[in-house]
Amino acid sequence: MATSESTGSGDSSPIPRSLHIELQTRFGLLRGNLAVPAGSMRLSELAWNALTLDERLIAMSIASEEKAGRQVSCRKGCGACCRQAVPVSPAEAWMLYDVVAALPPGRKSAVLERFAAARGRLFAAGFGDRSLGGRATDKDVLALGLDYFKLGIPCPFLEEESCSIHTHRPTSCREYLVTSPAENCAQPGVLPASPVPTAVSMTEGLSKLSALVLGGEPQVIPMTLALDWALEHREEGQQRFDAAFLLGSLVDLMSR
Ligand code: SF4
């Protein structure tokens, strides 16, 4: 549930400043206020604004694990999970496009070259016709994930086994945490990994919201193809929506 508070400035069109949220998760109720930018925003900006809420949800997940005596083993410099088929919501694909567009020229060229190389390897391996649609079963997702991992394609943002866009990394990267030994992540399907259960998936919430405001089915895009997808759908990515509506709808969708 999300309810807005306004500035109360007497203006005929009050500007919401914060949303009071109550979000039921598997670890209990998350209650608090979310800052809301004035006016309208694109879905890319929504994704950026949603990261604060995602961090609070992830903190709930970690607290639950620690209460059960388990510690998160993910550490800086371990990029094993960055060779997985990382799912990105449409809103985050546009956010990543904006992040890359704002990089200094030298860095931007290097990142774009890595994206092109990753895409080339993916298509050469026959992944061009495979996708993770909103109706994919867990078995479909697992099979595609294992096949993808076997290709050994590092995320184009990975540099010296660390994330080069750490503050802008998408929600699936933030939400994927394990309590099993780090080396197990390098051998999925062989050694068991123990992922930390998510309180509520922000990736899924952002995918559903993108479908709600733009039409169509919720979808996720593999990280490797996120920039191509964002470019192909740039007109939708430029559409603006009331910021309070977007954030309120996101919380409502995640509460269901
Ligand atoms: S965005 Fe960063 S954390 Fe996510 S897969 Fe890429 S390198 Fe890893």
Image (cartoon, rainbow, N blue to C red):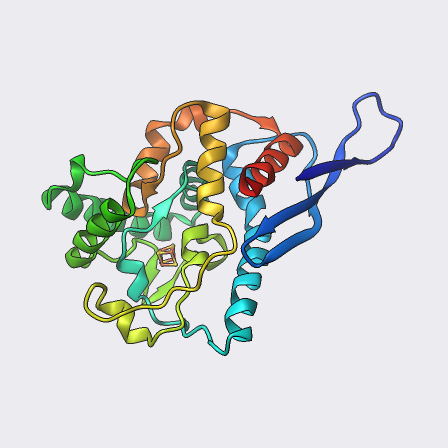
Q: Please determine whether, in this image, residue 30 is positioned above or below residue 134.
A: below
The one of 195 and 14 positioned closer to us in this rendering = 195
Q: Is residue 238 visible?
A: no
Tell me the quarter of the picture where residue 1 sits: top right
The one of 194 and 79 positioned closer to us in this rendering = 194
Report how many numbered discs are placed on residues in the image: 0
Residue depicted at 21% across the width and 68% down the height = 187
The quarter of the picture showing ligand 1: bottom left
Tell me: 125 left or right of 205: left
Image x and y of residue 124, in percent: 10, 44
Q: Is residue 128 visible?
A: yes
Image x and y of residue 6, in percent: 80, 35
Direction right: furthest residue = 10
Residue depicted at 35% across the width and 52% down the height = 106
Residue depicted at 79% across the width and 23% down the height = 13
Image x and y of residue 134, in percent: 34, 36
Image x and y of residue 184, in percent: 27, 72
Q: Please determine whether, in this image, residue 242 is positioned above or below residue 84.
A: above
Residue depicted at 29% across the width and 55% down the height = 155
